[in-house]
């Protein structure tokens, strides 16, 4: 699809003399909006709140190269000396206004009566108008619309800001050497997403409206028609920008070419230059990953969770309780960023994550050029294509056009807005110690959604002062849930020490449950290692409740020592009742009369073929991969072998980005996956 | 980093003067700036003293204590033989030992002598160095005893100190991010001084926590919070030397950038070793009493036998 220049089709383009820009700003102010536009600040052009047109960067021009940005004044005799926007996109983009770097998210407090108060912070936003957004900014906004407001969980803060946003876009008149929007099919012509579009020409702006709000704005200014000469100049100007940019990145097939090169030696090579400083991700107008900061008073009675920009380039980003990071090396982090931006974004959101603005190139403090890296890793870009080469717009392109391989995801209820993001309270009625460091909390709640939870799902659990961990549901009762919690960190330690009567705040139920129907008519194998029995216990409840639907049921339990076993009395009772439960421990004392050895040893002597088996496996990741190997040897089909994965989850609803594994959000698309769905990603280091 | 909660975390709801954790603030070779930063917490000081009993804090009170301490904040580096003995005693009297500031966590500015001729330094600084007993190296506390938590910076960030104390009272892990300064810089909406001005900045390799103070006033970070997790110092140094943005800095000038308040910490120290820029003697015209003796070939950092880091 060729990006069309929309000026010729816009009848009645108007002319806004430069001297009347203040009237435009005044009209926006009169509409109750704060007005944001580009200003020169500390050697760069950023978007900031403005009061008057004079604050715009009149007479400034910019040059950008990898790691190098310079502003300069145009000489007075330069034809563009009186222009405000002839200087490339503002480095900050408009992201700080639609998706600020810090947002209050949640307040949790212990009230005087001991009950828990939970407040999801309401978006505090002032209606905003942005002047000077470029085609790349609008493309990025469209991407964010999909990511933050078009998915199963909607970010309420973004949605509120977005609903109140009015955009006056400006056609680019200058392409810096880092711009490559033509390659990504997003510009330089402004096509969609703006309310008003301006093109700066001699003496003022050719203006068109692109929405009812924009039309009202322009109509209120009572402008004359621009006339064909000015419209012609506007078209010629942006066409020159397009020609200047060339075709630096071959976007066609990039998804597959990148993912075919996950083991490229170039990842290690770039890691020697890459500082993992996160600048590229923070200036990227589409990067959306956030982390949570908890602040509390000294007593820990009240705490607030703030959501702030985070980056996949930090070690903490992929860290889980216990301290290990899934992406310890810079090469892992660079690979995550690049493959997400240009490849797996397609799988997740049906568009590229890159809009070709080049900010990651210009603002990399060591000048790494993503275009070079893409060419080196995914294959060379075709540089001699004509300027009007076919390009696809992310917003419009059907995924099939990209030849994209979509991973076989089982359809879950992922309609926009279908995942709740609020918190409700539940009361602890019983705390049952399971092992030295693990306890089961029995919770009572009247919340219908929580009571409709299914085995394998989890909840985010908030208490004042602590981080908010994901906890799997270990049983679903008629009046509430049970959570079995191991004291892996301070928050979980605190939770295992709670007393009956305490309240917790829960977000959930979240994630994809165990697909129990996959085992109907088949032999069920439930394989648990240590704490991994917790999410499987609810499944076992349900399997036993529907006993007649299954051919056979076997339970395999592994633990480090006899004292690390969970639900011992319950499992003994089930075994006494005739359920086939086989337990093993890695190490045993004299009191243990059962089997000793790692869990995979239990299967070693199995004679039956596994073709009719559906296996549900949960435990430490290394245990699970070992079990998967043995199950594979026994012919248990990969599509009938189900695992639940642990990754860092901060939001639980697919918005914060931390738990990504390739194209998946483990929290939203999992945590339960089949081995067939995971493919090579199950064992790939650093993903 | 693990910070074990003090026992009072369990009864934190209603603290009384009886069960307040005993807190000490002590110093070794340092300027007292970090202690003053604690005193600058004017809005929080009253609440802090209600929750903690400050039994030793030389900048704040004449009351003295030799322990025991639930929490001990240690400022300064170990720079003399008697300090080396004293820190071992304090460690034995302390449950949670927290080092505060660049001196205690990385050796501080005085650790620059580690790179040079100790005697020459002494002679340059003191009129009669014979009266001064000092070690040839100034070392971080962690070179001598186990440290439970570190607050970085020259001086420390007061909010990080409150966060640490809050973590102690609530029993949670303090949120002391190990990311680059750049993250905070960009969250603040600051432009990169390397990119727009060719200003050398150690932000990409330095641990955040300061709030990006220096880039906020248009100058480069000089690394006072010390190396961050996974600091790619070679990547940054090569760009400063060879990249176009800074117009080609001299190698030793780049080495000198890393030889600041935390210059004795690895991997900063390795950059100065490789590129040059170690501090030179004389720092100023020699005093009446010249060097008692001088070594003509000052050792490379980390090779002195007295240097605890070299023994690791």
Image (tube, rainbow, N blue to C red):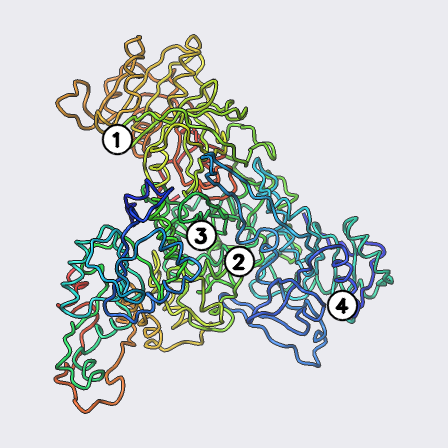
Q: Quadrant of residue A95?
A: bottom right
Mark 1 and mark 2 lie on one chain; the one further toward the N terminus is 2
The mark found on residue A377 in the picture is 3
Mark with earlier residue (1, 3): 3
Q: Secondary structure at mark 1?
A: loop
Residue at the far front: name it: B17
Q: Secondary structure at mark 4?
A: strand
Q: Dot 2 falls on which chain?
A: A
Question: Residue at 23% across / 18% down in the picture?
Answer: A605
The circle on residue A436 is 1
Q: Which residue is mark 4?
A: A201
Q: Secondary structure at mark 3?
A: helix
Which residue lies at the image location 31% right of the left edge and 8% below the top edge? A577
Which residue shows up at 24% across the image and 70% down it?
B29
Residue A452 relative to residue B261: left or right: right
- The reply to whether residue B265 is in sight is no
Residue A384 screen position, x and y as percent:
58, 59
Mark 3 vs mark 2: tell me if same chain. Answer: yes
> Label 4 lies in what chain?
A
The residue singled out by tag 2 in the image is A283
Name the chain letter of the residue that bears numbered label 1. Answer: A
Q: Are marks 3 and 4 on the same chain?
A: yes
Mark 3 or mark 4: which is in front? 4
Does residue B235 appear anywhere in the picture?
Answer: yes
Mark 1, mark 2: which one is toward the viewer?
A: 1
Label 1, residues with CA under 10 Å away: few <14, some 14-19, many ≥20: few
Mark 4 burial class by Cα count in 10 Å: few <14, some 14-19, many 20+: many
Q: Residues within 10 Å of mark 2 (few under 14, many from 20)?
A: many
- Numbered circle sitting on residue A254: none
């Amino acid at each position: 699809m060729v990006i069309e220049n929309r000026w010729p089709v816009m009848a009645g383009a108007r002319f806004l003399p430069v001297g009347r820009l203040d009237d435009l700003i005044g009209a926006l102010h009169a509409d109750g909006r704060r007005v944001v536009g580009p200003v020169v600040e500390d050697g760069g052009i950023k978007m900031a709140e403005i009061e008057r047109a004079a604050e715009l960067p009149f007479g400034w021009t910019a040059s950008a190269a990898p790691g190098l940005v310079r502003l300069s004044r145009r000489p007075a005799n330069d034809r563009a000396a009186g222009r405000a926007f002839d200087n490339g996109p503002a480095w900050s983009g408009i992201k700080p206004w639609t998706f600020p770097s810090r947002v209050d998210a949640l307040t949790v407090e212990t009230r005087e009566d001991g009950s828990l108060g939970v407040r999801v912070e309401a978006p505090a936003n002032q209606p905003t108008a942005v002047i000077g957004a470029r085609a790349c900014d609008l493309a990025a906004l469209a991407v964010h619309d999909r990511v933050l407001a078009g998915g199963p969980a909607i970010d309420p803060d973004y949605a509120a800001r977005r609903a109140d946003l009015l955009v006056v876009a400006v056609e680019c008149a200058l392409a810096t050497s880092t711009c490559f929007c033509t390659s990504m099919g997003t510009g330089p012509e402004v096509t969609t997403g703006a309310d008003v579009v301006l093109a700066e020409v001699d003496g003022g702006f050719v203006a068109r409206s692109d929405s009812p709000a924009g039309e009202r704005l322009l109509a209120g200014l009572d402008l004359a028609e621009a006339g064909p000469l000015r419209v012609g100049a506007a078209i010629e100007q942006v066409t020159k920008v397009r020609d200047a940019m060339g075709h630096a990145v071959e976007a066609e097939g990039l998804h597959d070419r990148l993912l075919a090169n996950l083991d490229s030696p170039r990842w290690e090579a770039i890691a020697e230059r890459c500082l993992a400083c996160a600048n590229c991700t923070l200036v990227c107008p589409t990067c959306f990953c956030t982390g949570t900061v908890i602040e509390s008073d000294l007593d820990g009675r009240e705490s607030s969770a703030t959501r702030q920009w985070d980056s996949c380039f930090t070690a903490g980003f992929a860290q889980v309780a216990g301290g290990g990071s899934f992406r310890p090396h810079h090469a892992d982090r660079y690979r995550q960023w690049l493959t997400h931006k240009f490849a797996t974004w397609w799988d997740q959101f049906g568009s590229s994550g890159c809009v070709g603005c080049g900010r990651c190139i210009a603002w990399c403090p060591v000048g790494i050029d993503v275009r070079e890296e893409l060419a080196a890793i995914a294959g060379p870009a075709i540089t001699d294509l004509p300027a009007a080469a076919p390009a696809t717009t992310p917003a419009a392109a059907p995924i099939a056009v990209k030849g994209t391989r979509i991973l076989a995801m089982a359809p879950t209820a992922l309609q926009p807005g279908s995942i709740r993001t609020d918190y409700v309270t539940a009361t602890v009625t019983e705390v049952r110690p399971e092992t030295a460091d693990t306890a089961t909390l029995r919770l009572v709640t009247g919340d219908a959604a929580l009571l409709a939870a299914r085995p394998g799902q989890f909840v985010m659990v908030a208490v004042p002062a602590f981080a908010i961990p994901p906890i799997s549901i270990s049983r679903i009762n008629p009046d509430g849930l049970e959570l079995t919690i191991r004291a892996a960190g301070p928050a979980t330690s605190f939770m295992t020490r709670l007393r009956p009567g305490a309240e917790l705040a829960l977000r959930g139920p979240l994630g994809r449950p165990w697909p129990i129907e996959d085992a109907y008519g088949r032999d069920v194998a439930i394989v648990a290692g240590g704490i991994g029995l917790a999410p499987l216990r609810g499944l076992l409840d349900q399997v036993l409740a529907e006993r007649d639907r299954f051919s056979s049921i076997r339970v395999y339990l592994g633990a480090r020592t006899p004292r690390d076993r969970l639900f011992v009395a319950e499992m003994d009772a089930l075994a006494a009742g005739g359920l086939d439960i086989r337990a093993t421990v890695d190490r045993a004392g004299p009191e243990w009369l059962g089997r000793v050895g790692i869990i995979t040893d239990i299967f070693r002597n199995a004679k039956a073929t596994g073709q009719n088996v559906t296996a549900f496996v949960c435990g430490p990741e290394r245990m699970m991969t070992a079990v998967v190997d043995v199950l594979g040897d026994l012919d248990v089909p990969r599509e009938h072998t189900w695992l639940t994965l642990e990754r860092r989850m901060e939001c639980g609803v697919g918005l914060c980005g931390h738990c990504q594994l390739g194209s998946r959000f483990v929290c939203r698309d999992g945590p339960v996956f089949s081995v067939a769905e995971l493919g090579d990603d199950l064992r790939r280091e650093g993903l | 980093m693990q910070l074990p909660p003090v026992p009072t975390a369990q009864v934190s709801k209603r603290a009384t003067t009886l069960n307040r954790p005993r807190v000490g603030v002590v110093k070794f070779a340092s300027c007292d700036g970090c202690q003053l930063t604690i005193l600058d917490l004017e809005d929080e000081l009253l609440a802090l003293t209600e929750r903690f009993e400050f039994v030793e804090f030389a900048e704040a009170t004449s009351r003295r204590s030799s322990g025991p301490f639930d929490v001990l904040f240690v400022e300064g580096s170990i720079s003399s033989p008697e300090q080396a003995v004293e820190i071992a005693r304090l460690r034995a009297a302390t449950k949670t030992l927290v080092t505060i500031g660049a001196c205690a966590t990385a050796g501080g500015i005085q650790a620059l002598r580690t790179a040079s001729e100790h005697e020459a330094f002494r002679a340059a600084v003191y009129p009669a160095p014979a009266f001064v007993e000092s070690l040839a190296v100034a070392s971080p506390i962690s070179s001598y005893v186990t440290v439970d938590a570190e607050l970085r910076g020259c001086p420390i960030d007061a909010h990080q100190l409150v966060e640490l104390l809050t973590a102690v009272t609530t029993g949670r892990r303090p949120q002391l991010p190990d990311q680059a300064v750049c993250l905070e810089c960009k969250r603040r909406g600051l432009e990169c001084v390397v990119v727009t001005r060719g200003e050398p900045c150690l932000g990409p390799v330095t641990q955040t926590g300061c709030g990006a103070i220096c880039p906020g006033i248009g100058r480069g970070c000089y690394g006072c919070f010390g190396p961050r997790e996974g600091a790619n110092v070679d990547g940054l140094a090569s760009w400063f030397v060879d990249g176009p943005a800074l117009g080609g800095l001299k190698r030793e000038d780049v080495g000198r950038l890393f030889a600041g308040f935390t210059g004795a910490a690895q991997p900063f120290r390795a950059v100065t070793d490789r590129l040059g820029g170690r501090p030179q003697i004389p720092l100023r015209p020699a005093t009446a009493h010249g060097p008692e003796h001088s070594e003509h070939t000052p050792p490379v950092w980390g090779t002195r036998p007295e240097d605890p880091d070299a023994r690791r």
